[in-house]
Amino acid sequence: MKRRIIEILRNGQSDESVTVQGWVRTKRDLKGFAFVEVNDGSSLASLQAVLKAEMPDYEATLKQINTGASVEISGVLVPSQGKGQRIELQAETVKVFGDADPETYPLQKKRHSFEFLRTIGHLRSRTNSLGAVFRVRNACATAIHQFFQERSFLWVHTPVITRNDCEGAGELFTVTSLDLKKIPQTENGKIDYSQDFFGGQAFLTVSGQLEAEVMAMAFSNVYTFGPTFRAENSNTSRHLAEFWMVEPEMAFCDLVGNMDLAEAFLKHIFKYVLETCPEDMKFFNQRIDDSVLATADNIINNQFERITYTEAIAQLEKATKTFEYPVEWGLDLQSEHERYLAEELFKKPVIVTDYPKQIKAFYMRVNDDDKTVRAMDVLAPKIGEIIGGSQREERLEVLEKRMQAQDINPDDLWWYLDLRRYGTVPHAGFGLGFERLVQFMTGMGNIRDVIPFPRAPLSAEF
């Protein structure tokens, strides 16, 4: 009976007949028998198989079984004689699907730098570290869907190709079918996008929020979970050109309800991952960052602090710590400010609300003071901002003034304004960068190591 290795390691019993399939991690060839470690990606630990010389074609088979080779081993489970695992497989038959030349296979049994592993993106998932990352990433995604589905949210698929810039930052990838060797031009010498595939300039999306608001105005509670893109030339350990975003939108919801949901959301994900991937999380705590488990405990078991931006500025101005960036009302908080609040001042997650309207997006609801908006950022120790959101502006006339102040053409978002004309309601939502979450949870130093195929400046291989 074919079994996954994680299930065998957890529940396998002596005298059970099983078949496993996977890739060889190590081989120890002793006189008359050999120990072969096999991993199928289901767990951090491998299953040890014991091959004996009396097996058919023992010598020929053993020559093919090198690190990286793919095999199928059938046999009987027996108590392990060595330390480190409860059970092992007494092999009866071995089939080699594909060998791996030990002279050229790049993942031999030694430590490899993450920088090197990025150059072999087609093989790096076979390592302990990246295997653990992608199992945790999978658990995070499962927890996200579970959280929203249990609360009757509708998962909506917002477009990857769009005509609008939700964030207004202008960091967009253009999508075109025009012949770049013979680009059509208008009379004034500009690109004539009317001849393009969509009849106008189109982009890869930076956010599904605006379209999610459309769906929330029909289904009340919705969420998106999909790829987004930023043409930001930032070659750092914190930035990707292609990443995944989770964005819930709730009709009949205000900023308080938004904060409550964001806090419950993070707690649920961390708790689910600790329960589902305990070995992987212990691995990160031992090998990557010894505060990983403490960070998870901090998220799960603390009530998040809630302060306004004005209160945060006052606290930062009183701090004895010297900051690289200035602290002043009206300036956005930098990562060092956010981490000080979460790590040093409150020592737990903090939700900062009511930011100055001039530093926030046009769609955020303006407060009665006409100086601040109903924005919120969730700040976490070790990473700073992990969630950003707001109560959205539901008043047509106020939204039109905000768009005018930020030089946004209302004709480009006529449909967005229609939502305020026909049955408008208070509504709110937030966005979570999925890779930032996985990086935060695992303690990995570079965001390119928590997505299978990272896209960054000058990097689109694999």
Image (cartoon, rainbow, N blue to C red):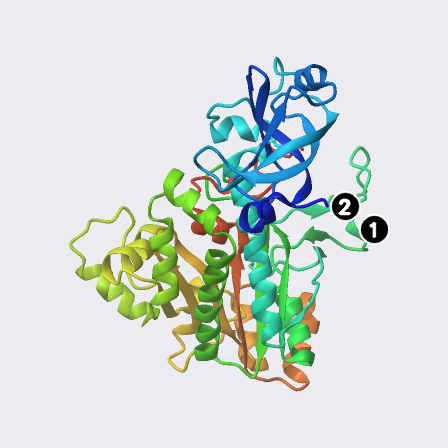
Viewed as shown, does residue 264 lie left or right of 165?
left
Q: Nearer the viewer, residue 447 or 171?
A: 447
Q: Is residue 188 above or below residue 380?
A: above
Residue 459, image x, y percentages: 60, 33
Dot 1 amino acid type: Phe
Q: Is residue 170 above or below residue 367?
A: above
Dot 2 amino acid type: Thr
Instruction: Name the residue furthest top.
Output: 103
Q: Is residue 32 above or below residue 388?
A: above
Residue 428, image x, y percentages: 53, 75
Q: Which residue is mark 1?
A: 197
Q: Nearer the viewer, residue 181 or 18?
A: 18
Q: Is residue 48 above or below residue 313?
A: above
Residue contact at pointers 2 and 1, CB within 8 angstroms: yes
Viewed as shown, does residue 434 lie left or right of 385?
right
Label 1: state its secondary structure: loop
Crowdedness near tag 1: few (<14), some (14–19) or many (≥20) residues, C-alpha within 10 Å: few
Residue 177, image x, y percentages: 81, 44
Give the number of the disc on residue 176.
2
Can residue 440 be seen here? The reply is yes
Instruction: Name the residue furthest bottom.
Output: 423
Distance from the alpha carbon under mark 2 to that under mark 1: 7 Å
Residue 319, image x, y percentages: 18, 57
Q: Locate residue 352: give its quadrant.
A: bottom left
Q: Locate residue 462: give its quadrant.
A: top right
